[in-house]
Image (tube, rainbow, N blue to C red):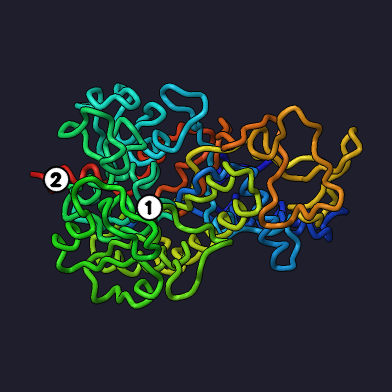
Amino acid sequence: MIFTTRSLTAGASLLALVSTAAAQDRLPQADDSYFIAAREQLARKIADQPNVGRAKNVVLFVGDGMSIPTMTAARIYEGQSRGVDGESNVLSFEELLPYTALSKTYTHDGQVADSAPTATAIVAGVKSSNGTIGVDQRAKPDDCASQKGTEVTTIFELAEAAGLATGIVSTARITHATPAATYAKVAGRDWEADTNLPEGAGGVCKDIAAQLVDWPAGDGFEVVLGGGRANFMLEDQKDPEDETKTGKRKSRDLVAEWKARHNDGAYIWNKQEFDALDPAATGRVLGLFNASHMQYEADREKDAGGEPSLAEMSSKAIDMLSRDEDGFVLMIEAGRIDHAHHAGNAARAMVDTVALADAVKAVYDKVDPAETLIIVTADHAHTFNIAGYPKRNNPILGIAGMGDDGKPYTTLGYMNGPGARMDEPRADLSGVDTTDLDFLQQALVPLGESETHAGDDVAILAQGPWAHLFHGVVEQNLIYHVMDQASGLATRAALAAK
């Protein structure tokens, strides 16, 4: 007989569970380790009850390009790196965030997405065209005139209007597509500095970096940490980290403008300054730690002149934002998972995915999970895959087997990208250290400059108020609507405006 809580009283339901457990104990597999582990997992799920309270805080993690195979491979990689069983290993967000859904990542005009409209879908609730940020489906990519009247309002702007604190953290340029979606409205995602604007756009369309400094929402971001320093500096200004590099702007020293506008703020650009920053004594922070994207976690310089980790930036962001008694909304992007995949370099993608898991754990430990909606998702997938029949505990970056051409092939590979060869036989990997950090996985279709995104659904994992709404297969733009349902920010912003 099958017992359900729908048909039984609470007492009868408990009796059914006890009876089920007793019956399970009599099965021949009752002592099997996998069977026991699954029963324990079931018990945790039964005990978990949906939280329908208001979310004081919202923390949105975006693993840029973190496809489901990326999560699986990183889970195995992280476990093997610690000398434990990789296959049964669990990343922090897999353990801490119990509610899961699949997100459909197509855009208004594309089967396969880029990061600009997908980030817009996540933070503003609409699908739009590839290449556009912060606008709806009516805006035409790279058409400045078309964006007028198509601008959308993000969950971050609602938070500012309602009096909450806001922040963005990214290992990519802070003007790159995903973090830019929190504040920018552009028909062209590449308009990061004024030198990137199309001819005739001056005075009509504003570059992304300028939009960050001029952001009119509330009193502006309390925390901005990431890369992209050059987009805020003038062309004749030398970069403080490398004097052979200069800024990219024709007009407006945006760092100087930001500092002049925020007497309570601190501008920082290296780890020494980051470590010295006192969250209790600093009203807001602008941290730009690289002229372009920050370093991959595997290559990150950890000394005083280097860069903070994603977990360190996330932790400091929580320390600063938590001072606001009304709560906060924070985006944290592991931006370089995507870049490693584009390079066909699985090892660096794995390390940056593990860094994201570390950041999730750091944030979870600093907030009250009962009043904080935490979401981990990706904007899109990649052509990355796990294949063959490698034995249990085989190195995830290792050889999976032998092809019919008599040459070894790796467990991890790509459908297209730099790892393929033009009109040449597949490379023989015999004697090649495929676990080397710089090894590029083989690919089928040669694309010398960059592997492409993929159209797979990606995962959404969540915990906290209203996180139970994430189940089944959903549209990507539902994420915004769940964040608003949990926080009530649209209503709170409207009331504050009266």
Q: Amino acid at mark 1?
A: Met
Of helix, strand and loop, which one carries label 1? strand
- Graded by Cα atoms within 10 Å as few (under 14), some (14 to 19) or many (20 or more), the crowding at tag 2 reads few
**Residue 421 located left or right of residue 383:** right
Quadrant placement of the N terminus: top right
Residue 367 locus on image (x, y percent): 39, 66
Query: Which residue carries the number 2 mark?
Result: 495
Residue 359 locus on image (x, y percent): 49, 62
What residue lies at 44% left-to-right and 64% top-to-bottom? 363
Q: Amino acid at mark 2?
A: Leu
**Residue 368 located left or right of residue 186:** right
Front disc: 1 or 2: 1
Of helix, strand and loop, which one carries label 2? helix
Cα separation, mark 1 vs mark 2, equals: 24 Å
Query: Which residue carries the number 1 mark?
Result: 331
Q: Is residue 238 above or below residue 316?
A: above
What residue lies at 29% left-to-right and 60% top-to-bottom? 223
Quadrant placement of the C terminus: top left
Residue 209 locus on image (x, y percent): 27, 47
In terms of image quadrants, where is residue 294? bottom left
